[in-house]
Amino acid sequence: MLILLLSMIAKFMITVVAQDCNPVDFGRGSIVCECNSTYCDYYVDPQPLSPGEFIWYVTSKSGKRLSQSNGKISKEFIEGSSTVHIDSDNEYQTIEGFGGAFTDAATMNIKKLSQGSQDNLLRSYFGTNGSKYNFGRVPIGGSDFSVRAYTYDNISNDIDLQHFTLAPEDLLYKIPVMSKALELNPSLRFVSAAWTAPPWMKNRHQYYGYSYLLEKYYQTFANYIIRFLELYKQKGLDIWAVSTGNEPFTSLVPTAKVSSMFWSARTVSKWVVKNLGPTLQKSRSNSTYILMLDDQRIHLPWYLLDVKFFHKEALNYIKGIAVHWYTDSFSLPSILDVTHRIAPDKFILMTEACVGDRPWERPKVSLGSWSRAERLIQKIFENINHWVVGWIDWNIALDVNGGPNWVENYVDASIIVVPEKDIFYKQPLYYVMTHFSKFVPRSSIKIEAKTTDSNILVTAFKSPDNQTVVLLYNKSNKQRSVSVVDKNVGSINVVLLEYSLHTILYKTV
Ligand SMILES: *[C@@H]1O[C@H](CO)[C@@H](O)[C@H](O)[C@H]1NC(C)=O
Ligand SMILES: *[C@@H]1O[C@H](CO)[C@@H](O)[C@H](O)[C@H]1NC(C)=O
Ligand SMILES: *[C@@H]1O[C@H](CO)[C@@H](O)[C@H](O)[C@H]1NC(C)=O
Ligand SMILES: *[C@@H]1O[C@H](CO)[C@@H](O)[C@H](O)[C@H]1NC(C)=O
Ligand SMILES: *[C@@H]1O[C@H](CO)[C@@H](O)[C@H](O)[C@H]1NC(C)=O
Ligand SMILES: *[C@@H]1O[C@H](CO)[C@@H](O)[C@H](O)[C@H]1NC(C)=O
């Protein structure tokens, strides 16, 4: 009777503090959570922790979504079948944040929903009871995730940019959605990048294919970027950082029909030193940072070394190195360690990552796929454990085909919208991002976390409000008991379900 009563109380408490996932199973390994204009799953912040207590969130292949429980830290060390050691005195990089991209496709998809569903979607990402995303990426002009190719100035030889105008995509979709997101989270930062200069500024007047910026337009293109920053600023959207251009190496791939423009380390560093850097510094957007590369880590560290070699002064203007994850399986994460050693003052930020990107991945959108969630989990752990300071997902919302995309380069996304039904699905990917974004606030410091069990992934942080945040993933197909041992605090003993992701919080001593 007492047990029954207690279990009722426990149930009651859970319904008060959180709104549960409404699960739908499409038979792809795990579930999605369905939201509409009046219902969506939300996760309220935990009560402040007292010493000796921990809070534990679990998302699993079997269907748990940020399911919360509390426990007591044991003072004595209890041997589990695996041990994880946390050492908060051993500090690494400072975390900048987590987020996703406001592409034309994503914001057009969002705007197809009713106001109620739009609110639930944006609150899911940016709200206090949602993922607390604090990064957004926005293309300067069109990307492949647009319904057409365009830039902001299509008039040949318009060197004074008299015909520069923002596009309907900015005014009707990106800016309104970004503004709403910023309202939900005032500490949201935007990073941006142009996929290409206007074709008339390039050697070949095309959006994609091998092309580069003509030197006679170096200053014009710097002005073009700054015009964008200033017009967005006028709309209340300060851009925190702009990269030197999205994926310059895509321009060298003959089959890639993605708008692009090639920069070698030599040309880009020259452009930064002579044009972009000084012009930005003199502009009203002088607080916007410049990021370099914005492409696969396989180009590191030599791209950085070449920048150093050709125009070292460019590094005075460059704040960080932006990387994408698409070739991570062909390049060792130690590349990031080497890069960090060469330029310890430049942070490394993941600015684009999505699943469903590989040609053989079908369908492009796989509703409820756990194997895709697992790929994301492994790569976030890997990158964060090699100096990466944050992770920006690609499109924040796609349709069930993984678009729209004017060159049919469809991919998967954390949220999939179904405008005909005025609903959206939160994929397992959404919860993977949330396990980080919600519990690892900006300015957290990555600390040492180690295990000898090769079936467990681990990473850990110290947050600015003095909490230790430990993330674990059990990548084996069996459950296991684990002791998380923090020499300053004690030992936390948990059982990890097969294929489950965990965030554990406790007060740092
Ligand atoms: C939204 O979903 C909830 C939960 O499934 C359901 O009760 C409600 O009727 C739905 N609302 C609309 C407008 O369809
Ligand atoms: C978060 O959820 C709690 C509980 O439902 C609610 O009281 C609070 O207003 C929500 N906060 C926001 C910002 O929506
Ligand atoms: C830009 O100009 C080119 C060449 O004049 C034209 O073919 C193209 O349709 C224009 N694009 C846009 C978006 O106006
Ligand atoms: C940036 O520009 C503002 C004026 O817009 C100026 O007050 C400030 O000193 C500038 N900062 C730097 C670092 O140049
Ligand atoms: C965190 O701990 C440090 C060092 O003990 C202390 O100075 C700081 O005030 C604490 N911050 C918070 C938010 O409690
Ligand atoms: C992960 O789950 C599997 C399957 O239940 C189990 O055998 C294994 O011990 C678990 N690993 C950990 C670290 O909990």
Image (cartoon, rainbow, N blue to C red):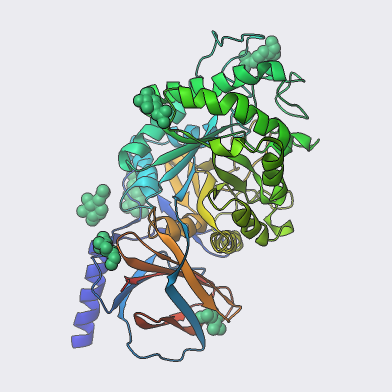
Residue 87 is situated, as x and y percent measured from the top left of the image, at: 44, 75
Q: Is residue 415 visible?
A: yes
Would residue 32 appear left or right of 76 to someone viewing this image? right
Which residue reaches farthest right?
254
Q: Residue at x 26, y 72 (%)?
A: 11
The number of discs equals: 0
Residue 54 is situated, as x and y percent measured from the top left of the image, at: 32, 75
Quarter-of-image position of residue 15: bottom left
Residue 333 is situated, as x and y percent measured from the top left of the image, at: 65, 60
Q: Is residue 361 above or below residue 293?
A: below
Q: Is residue 102 visible?
A: no
Q: Quadrant of the C terminus?
A: bottom left
Given residues 116 and 339, the one toward you in this image is: 339
Given residues 302 and 134, the one toward you in this image is: 302
Q: Residue at x 23, y 63 (%)?
A: 16
Q: Quadrant of the N terminus?
A: bottom left
Q: Residue at x 58, y 45 (%)?
A: 321
Given residues 455 and 414, the one toward you in this image is: 455
Q: Residue at x 34, y 40 (%)?
A: 119
Would residue 107 appear left or right of 321 to someone viewing this image? left
Q: Is residue 90 above or below residue 39?
A: below
Residue 508 is situated, as x and y percent measured from the top left of the image, at: 32, 71
Given residues 44 and 360, the one toward you in this image is: 44
Q: Is residue 153 above or below residue 114?
A: above
